[in-house]
Image (cartoon, rainbow, N blue to C red):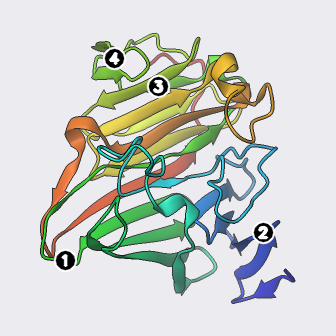
Amino acid sequence: MTEQFLSEHISQSALNELPVLRITNDRASATISLQGAQVLEYTPVNGDNLLFTAQGEPFKQGQAIRGGIPICWPWFGKHPTLADAPMHGLARELAWQYRVVADTDTRTDILFWLDCDGQHPAFPYKARAELLVSIGSSLVVSLTTLNLGSEPFQLSQALHTYFACRDHRQVRITGLAERPYLDKLTGNSGHFPYAFSFDREIDWVVSDLGQPLLLRGLGQKAIQMTRLGSRSVVVWNPASEKSQTLSHFLPDEYQRMFCVEASNALEDCRLINSHSSHVLVMELAAVDVDATEPA
């Protein structure tokens, strides 16, 4: 696809089979796939890309993209009742509609939306997902779920953010210490350790209070994550053995990524009543923090 300029700061092009929007303003650049409304890159001016995307990603229609910020919606993980339903919901493999809400030298806001007509067997409800992506000095991703039907439905979801790092073993997460977690690999429970590190395969759902988190030891600036509408966090790295089974991963790429996901998972799932809504917001900002500072 030939690059088309939609405004001074927004153009549309393609990554292999997938159309993408490219945003460049005075504060940052970003790339967003129209499939999945998935932010693939966010790079502050004079900084590094905060997000990771697998080098082997083929960017094919109908295939979930390995990296960036996949939207897991309207369920996270396996479907609660249908074994053959797509993993992590419907949103990642579908094309979203969009419109530009605002575009200035310092901030670009784009609204994406996906409508469900109630005919899908795994989600027989009329609903809309709206994703407002704001690119500026920080990256703000706001996911609104609207129940447009007459019946309530249960919602679990995640902004499945892949962060870039130089060595996953050096990554430190500040803000979750002593919060309870469920290990999805073993079914065991525990409390998030002060001395946490990605020293093995990790797939934990941490119950928290929605407090800010600091991600450091990345080999670049630390990242401040703030959230609204989220009382759970998914912490994940596949480690060597599991990464060999994942699509599009090169053999050692697990060392250069990790996931910390703003979510509504397990006990934090939400009941969305008829003609009601729920908003999940995540903001990411690169900050100057010495990676050697104590948690």
Q: Which residue is depicted at the point 67% across and 17% down?
A: 241
Reply above or below: 190 against 221.
above
Q: Secondary structure at mark 2?
A: loop
Q: Are marks 4 and 2 in contact (CB under 8 Å)?
A: no
Q: Marks 4 and 2, how far apart in space?
A: 39 Å
Q: Position of residue 78 (x, y in %)?
A: 40, 41
Q: Are marks 3 and 4 in contact (CB under 8 Å)?
A: no
Instruction: Give the residue type that dot 3 points to.
Output: Asp
Q: Marks 2 and 1, how far apart in space?
A: 34 Å
Q: Position of residue 126 (x, y in %)?
A: 27, 75
N-terminal label among 2 and 1: 2
Residue that label 4 marks: 187
Q: Which residue is depicted at the point 75% across and 59% down?
A: 59
Which of discs 3 and 2 lies nearer the camera? The answer is 2
N-terminal label among 4 and 1: 1
Reply above or below: 157 against 94.
above
Instruction: Give the residue type that dot 4 points to.
Output: Gly
Reply above or below: 258 against 241.
below
Q: Secondary structure at mark 4?
A: loop
Residue that label 2 marks: 17
Q: Marks 3 and 2, how far apart in space?
A: 31 Å
Q: Which residue is depicted at the point 40% across and 43% down?
A: 83
Residue that label 1 marks: 149
N-terminal label among 3 and 2: 2
How many marks do you count on the picture? 4
Q: Position of residue 197 (x, y in %)?
A: 53, 15
Residue 107 in which image quadrant: bottom right
N-terminal label among 4 and 2: 2
